[in-house]
C-alpha cells in the first residue's frame, strides 16, 4: 500500500509560499514524492494542508527532516509545521 504524508502548516503569505513550493518540485520528486494535493482551510488561506504520496516513509522522513528543507521552510515563511506519516490500510469508492 502507498505511504502518505500529511503536513499541516501556517504560512506567512500563501502566494510567496506557493512559488517556493512549486520551485521545489524537482527535489521533492527526486526524494520520492509521487503525487500531492495542496488544500487550504476554508477560513484562512494561509493555513495550508499538503497531502502527498511517497515511495517510502523513510524517504519522506529523511526529506522533511533534512537541513536543506528546514532552510527552505524558513525562507518560505512556514510556521511550525506538523508532519503526520501515514500508511494506507484501505481505499474505496462509494457509488
Image (cartoon, rainbow, N blue to C red):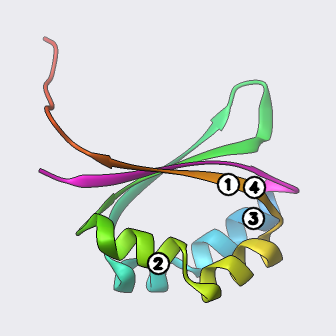
Q: What number is the disc on residue 63? A: 2
Q: How packed is label 4: few (under 14 Cα within 10 Å), some, or many (20 or more)?
A: few
- x and y percentages locating residue 64 in the rendered image: 52, 72
Look at the picture and state if 26 lies above or below 93. Answer: below
Look at the picture and state if 77 lies above or below 39. Answer: below
In this rendering, position of residue 60 left or right of residue 89: right
Residue bounds of the magenta highlight: 1-14
What's the CA distance linking mark 2 and mark 1?
Answer: 14 Å
What's the CA distance linking mark 3 and mark 2?
Answer: 18 Å
In this rendering, position of residue 14 left or right of residue 35: right
Q: Residue at x 80, y 74 (%)?
A: 74
Residue wearing tag 3 = 17
* Residue 21 occupies quadrant: bottom right
Residue wearing tag 4 = 80
- x and y percentages locating residue 45 in the rendered image: 77, 39
Looking at the rendered structure, the secondary structure element under dot 4 is: strand
Evaluate whether residue 33 shows in this view.
no
Q: How packed is label 3: few (under 14 Cα within 10 Å), some, or many (20 or more)?
A: many
Amino acid at each position: 500500500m502507498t505511504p502518505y504524508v500529511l503536513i499541516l502548516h501556517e504560512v506567512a503569505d500563501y502566494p510567496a509560499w506557493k512559488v517556493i513550493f512549486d520551485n521545489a518540485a524537482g527535489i521533492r520528486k527526486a526524494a520520492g514524492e509521487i503525487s500531492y494535493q495542496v488544500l487550504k482551510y476554508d477560513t484562512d488561506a494561509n493555513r495550508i494542508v499538503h497531502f502527498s504520496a511517497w515511495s517510502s516513509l523513510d524517504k519522506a522522513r529523511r526529506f522533511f527532516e533534512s537541513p536543506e528543507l528546514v532552510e527552505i521552510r524558513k525562507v518560505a515563511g512556514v510556521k511550525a509545521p506538523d508532519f503526520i506519516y501515514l500508511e494506507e490500510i484501505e481505499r474505496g469508492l462509494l457509488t
